[in-house]
Image: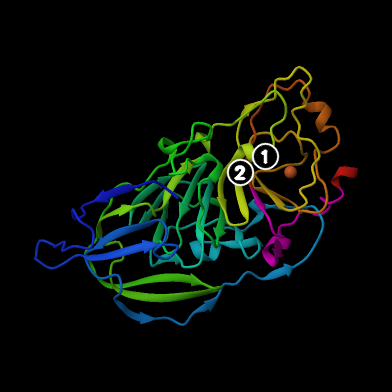
Amino acid sequence: MPHYYSLGKIPHKRHTQFRREDGNLYSEQLFSTEGFSNDYSLLYHIHPPTEIISTDDPYEVQPRIAEEKMLKHRSFEGFSVKPEADYLKSRKPVLVNSDCHIVLAAPQQSMKDYFYKNADADEMIFIHRGSGVLKTQYGELAFGYGDYLVIPRGTIYQIQFEDADNRLFIVESFSPIRYPKKYLSPYGQLLEHSPYCERDIRGPQRLTSIDEKGDFLIRMKKKGRMYGIHYGHHPLDVVGWDGCCYPYAFSIHDFEPITGRVHQPPPVHQTFEGHNFVVCSFCPRLFDYHPLAIPAPYNHSNIDSDEVLYYVDGDFMSRKNVTKGMITLHPGGIPHGPHPGAVQRSIGAKETKELAVMVDTFHPLMLTVDALEIENPGYTMSWAE
Ligand SMILES: [Fe+2]
């Protein structure tokens, strides 16, 4: 839930006559992800955003579930996901439930021939590798290593990558992705104890409105199907907008870690939340400074959540054999903790360079066929080695 923002030209009063130079009216569009009763934006298009000229037959993109139920610690080699030229084809859902889908992607090419809209889910795209520009009706967001791009459901977008080496960790959320409630004032300002604030949030820039007639394809995902809907005008034809519902970027490198004399629990790393899940950022930080502190985490029984950790960079003191892009899944129901020797090794350490993204889901995750293809065998018993 970002704060009020405005770009381009808008009329003084909402819902009033706002005319183009030729005297015709701009088309006003109210955009929200929760009816008319929550945050919204008002966009002003050169042409009506309703002008469908043809539709394609839909195709299935529902994740292929391989294991619906399980109770084992698992680990996956994220960078073993094969790169694919096309952005949408490159997206491989690996861990899914009815609240969110966790997706890995290694797209090689920019989106050129189509635009994309996820009609079901807000998207949080974490840029592990690569840089480029996210183009939307709200303007452009330049992105690079370490950026979270948060894109509300229904946003039409196109991504341009600078080169072919891109690695993305994506969460599709079937509820709005928001800042953690505990860090917000009753009226929505990020409070003093929040690990980031409004200055760290990057709103869209460079609004370019394109007045172009033609055949513009928007691929739209809804309920596990991809629809192709063609419009008669370029979809990025907005001359101005304002409101509180828009895509934004936040860099994990701008997250200010909260530390203490003794080990701090994972909620201090919380960055975003959706319905029934949270996203946390584990960033380089000084370790606990009590004279008898144990910097490695204690064993814990997360009985009511599945813990997904996505390793980004640095050293990971509590685990062995960690690689970049690795995912560990510690399901609710059985305790987990540091690998043998990690607790003793951590004593006296002053700082960690670890960088990781964690997603805790409050309902169990299912594993897809794509997840099993990149699984590290033997992880379940790795504490006994
Ligand atoms: Fe954990």
- In the visual, does 121 lie left or right of 101? left
Q: Given the image, on which type of amino acid does mark 2 rest?
A: Cys
Q: Which mark is residue 266?
A: 1
> Toward the viewer: 186 or 194?
186
Residue 287, position in %: x, y? 68, 25
Crowdedness near tag 2: few (<14), some (14–19) or many (≥20) residues, C-alpha within 10 Å: many
Magenta region: which residues?
A: 359-381
Residue 191, x across and y down, in percent: 48, 35
Q: Which residue is mark 2?
A: 280
Between 262 and 189, the one lying in front of the other is 189
Is residue 302 visible in the rendered structure shown here?
yes
Q: Amino acid at mark 1?
A: Pro
Q: Identify which residue is drawn at 71% across, 63% down.
A: 367
Residue at the outermost top position: 291
Residue 160 is situated, as x and y percent measured from the top left of the image, at 41, 54
Residue 86 can be seen, yes or no: no
- Quadrant of the rendered image containing residue 217: bottom left
